[in-house]
Amino acid sequence: MTAHRIDASLTTAIDVFDATRPPVLRVDPGDTVTVRTLSAAGYTERQPEPGAEVPTLLPSRRGHCLVGPIAVDGARPGQVLAVHFDDLVPDDWGYTGSGGVDTPVNRALGLVERESRGPLLWSVDADRGTARNQLGLSVRTAPFLGVVGVAPDPIGEHSTIPPRPVGGGNIDCRELVAGSTLFLPVTVPDGLLWVGDGHAAQGDGEVSGTAIECGMTTTMTLEVLDDAPVAGIHATTPAGRITFGFDADLNTATTTALDAMVDWIAGLFAIGRAEALAMASVAVSMRVTQVANRTWGVHALLPHDAITATR
């Protein structure tokens, strides 16, 4: 096992998924990678005041500023890439935007006009686990990466903005903190993983369209598995087991996440799907992962100690 280090730069960062892009790093299964990413916007300097323009690493701003792809030698379609987050350390500053953009949520809340924007600037104390904004309001931090994904298709450029049932990407799940493992079905040879969009803190839903957006130093171990407990994108986290659904229709996203969780419960306890659905009804929480990207994200959460077997 080898430890690697890679930082965001003009040669390692990109704002689309593109499987034809040469890998910026090649690792073996079991290797550990420490990645330094910038915020989603790719800001290279702290904003001195709300709304101030500061330089970005990538001028195009087509999507999230990501680092990748990272090739995992020998990974092939049909296998699963297990991304274990060993450590996530946010930078000491971040920002949260709201309003001023024509989205369904902002339209419903009457916050479409540019003058309605309400940006917050944060000072982040990673050691204390807190962040404080210019209003004098503080929150607890729980750092994670909003975007962790592989190319949805081997050909062409693909937006980083919508989360996808194939490839993952902009999942924005607040439970993917240190100690979590995200399981991504491999879509292209060598896996080709992109990461970025650091969040120091976020609620379920990411309702303004942003979290505490920040740079992040992530240490992760990459494994390749032949089998996984369930199909599709799923995770084990300190909070519990998680399955995901992504779709423009909330009902479809919900049933996709629930369907995978029913399979997981059935496999864990050797029971039928009908019994597993009944157990899910009393032990699983269905949560809206994010509403920010015009594709609903829903995750089903089964806490580790929610079901015990006594037979």
Image (cartoon, grey):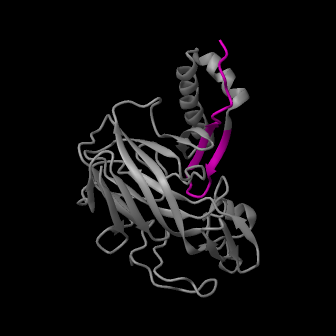
Q: Residue at position x 49%, y 72% from top?
A: 41
Q: Quadrant of residue 67?
A: bottom left
Give the quadrant of residue 137.
bottom right
Q: Going 58% across and 86% down the picture, which residue do you hit?
A: 52
Name the residue at 52% across, 21% down. 267
Q: Which residues are magenta?
A: 286-311
Quadrant position of residue 97: bottom right
Residue 81: percent from left, percent from top:
37, 42
Residues 165 and 2: in front is: 2
Residue 34 spot, x, y in % from top left: 39, 61
Residue 273, horizontal then vertical, whole percent: 58, 18
Judged from this view, the residue extending furthest toward the top is 311
Extreme residue toward the right, this view:
136
- Residue sitting at x 57%, y 39%: 242
Residue placed most toward the observer, 294 or 68: 68
Residue 261 relative to residue 160: left or right: right
Give the left or right position of residue 142, taking residue 156 as reference: right
In the rendered view, tell whether residue 185 sits above or below residue 52.
above
Which quarter shows the C terminus? Answer: top right
Q: Is residue 234 above or below residue 157?
A: above
Is 305 a magenta residue? Answer: yes
Q: Is residue 211 above or below residue 297?
A: below
Placement of 281 over or under 145, stated as above or below: above
> As rendered, which of 204 and 265 lies closer to the eye?
265
